[in-house]
Image: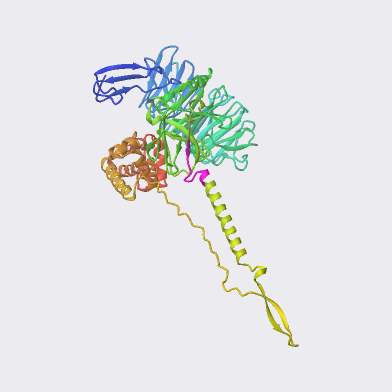
Amino acid sequence: CHDVSDKEGIRSNSIYSLLVDDRGAVWVGHFQAGLDYSLYQNGLFQTYAYPPLFNSANLSIRSFVNRGHEKVIGSRDGLYYINEATGVVKSFVKPVLTSDLILTICFYEGEYYIGTYGGGMMVLNPETLSLKYFAQGGDGDAELFQKGHIFCVRPDEKGNLWIGTSQGLFCYNKQAKQIKHFTSANSQLPEGNVYEVSFDSTDKGWIATETGMCIYDPASQSLRSNVFPEGFVHRDKVRTIYEDTGHDLYFIREKGSLFTSTLTMDRFRNRSVFSTLPDNSLMSIVEDNQGWLWVACNDGLLRIKEEGEEYDAFTFNDGVPGPTFTNGAAYKDDKGILWFGNTKGLIYVDPKRVDEVRGKVRPIVFTDILANGVSFTSSSLKYNQNNLTFCFTDFAYGLPSALLYEYQLEGIDKDWKLLAAQNEVSYYGLPSGTYTFRVRLPGNEHSEAICQVTVRPMIPWWGWMLSILLIIGIVAFIRYYVWKRMRRLLPSPAQVVSTPAKDISGKEQVTERPETIAEQPEVISEQPSVATEEKYKTNRLTEEECKELHKKLVTYVEKEKPYINPDLKMGDLASALDTSSHSLSYLLNQYLNQSYYDFINEYRVAQFKKMVEDSHYSRYTLTALAELCGFSSRASFFRSFKKSTGVTPNEYIRSIGGTAKEE
């Protein structure tokens, strides 16, 4: 029913019509209040719940362990223990739980080891459901395991538990009640936080720290950092290490593209996951039973195969509740089901259903095609109708901000380009030629739509042919005219006369000479006329119109601050300014040389700078401030801020003497 406090509710209780379509979406028609509909999701992904006792929806999941009927989930709202076999669900929050940021969870020797940020490490006993501090370290380590940072906890094949901390690396054996502490002082462990410990299929340990990597050699039981070849990632900050079924290793770094290597490091290279994906957005990776690699990012989820030639991108329409995934939180269970930690829940998917769902997708439909801002139906355009806009939809009726397409204009775009949260693409000043525009859901050929448009040249081919023939005819006529003229002016034999002359003997001699020509031959000078080409001006707006619209735009944005709305679209802005989307797009792209999103995000960045200088907002986290400024995700905020200022938000805050809250 209608509730003024519920933004996702219906707008009126006067319901006059109702429809449930073939996809299960509910359409509600109101009396004098328009049409509402429920957002479509195809159900490929599910958010884990154990009703009615537990539901992970809208929980920010940082870590989890899935042991079939028994699950332990770490979130920003506490630690949860779920046993579906016994029907037991228990949550742990502060002060019993020492920290609300749970970085890692590991099952070891019948208990769960919980590593936190700033709260040390705790141990959960599933039999008694009691939570206690880990107290097996030396006297000097007590404070670390109660108040320090525990980044990763991993068991090896020999019954040891490896613990990566802010004060080095620990190797703990519960049976022998022994613990060994590795530091940069007593071993070749690189300095800084130990973020990752991963054991490969040969029992070799890969240790990643804040300043580099080392390898644990089980034969010598020592750490070695001098075994890496030149060009490897052993000096980078690696956050996740994963081995696939082909025994290739994948390294996810804090900055940089995905790095792959063989176990022996004889072959390694950087690998691009997706041409439009930022290198620093990778969070976790897992392989399914069909050989696809699933890559979770801070701005989406992908699966790739065959060096990225086959790929899929998953969005809200597939059941993914939010675009941001958490670091290292990816797992494949015994049934082949994939699990991912997301900022809006613990989600899972059966990879075998992907092709089935992708095959049922509706093809994309072109809703309009504009030339110079005007709709047209003919596929052949005049030479000056070369500013094209393609509008389209997949009729999914999902979350508008989660729209994801890829497009390509053959002859202009070399590769597919990603388009997020929009459903139109514009090209300006296209030269004459035939163009094929393609658009589809990322990697999905079943959804592809094609439109072919021809921009005719100013002079058609037959016009050029006539011009060439005319020039050839004129040249031939001039040459013929000159030849005839010169021939007419040359002396003929009849014009030769004899005049008497006397030799030395006094006799007359006859001397032949040509008759004097009184007139000189006429010089013929011909200059071909030069056709003057008329300049065509493609601007739909004059200079004065651009200035007036720009002034109106800036005044409105600075006064009304529409940019704090994360769902603000160009059409909304154009309506507020009483102009068309095409005119506004032309103003931004052609007059201001700026994209719509760059223009809006600059105001959001400026709003953020004002807020961090205001003590009223000092208790807010970076993510909360970014949302107040209108950014739809933490990832887009960081990209826009770095692009606008050249520094990260944290670096900016430190430059003005402030301290940022990361989470």
Magenta stretch: give its range: 453-463
* On screen, residue 581 above or below 110: below
Displayed quadrant of residue 205: top right
* On screen, residue 126 above or below 272: above
Residue 395 magenta-highlighted: no
| Residue 437 in the figure: left or right of residue 503 | left
Q: Quadrant of the C terminus?
A: top left
State the image coordinates of residue 330 (x, y, percent, origin top left): 49, 26
Displayed quadrant of residue 586: top left
| Residue 393 in the figure: left or right of residue 354 | left
Residue farthest bottom in this picture: 505
* On screen, residue 498 above or below 342: below
Say if residue 113 shows up in the picture: no
State the image coordinates of residue 33 (x, y, percent, origin top left): 25, 24
Chosen colour scheme: rainbow
Query: Of residues 469 and 524, which is closer to you in this image?
Result: 524
Residue 457 magenta-highlighted: yes
Query: Of residues 412 and 215, which is closer to you in this image?
Result: 412
Q: Residue at x 57, y 52 (%)?
A: 472
| Residue 492 in the figure: left or right of residue 254 | right
Q: Residue at x 33, y 19 (%)?
A: 27
Displayed quadrant of residue 558: top left
Q: How many marks?
A: 0
Say if residue 544 shows up in the picture: yes
Q: Residue at x 42, y 51 (%)?
A: 535
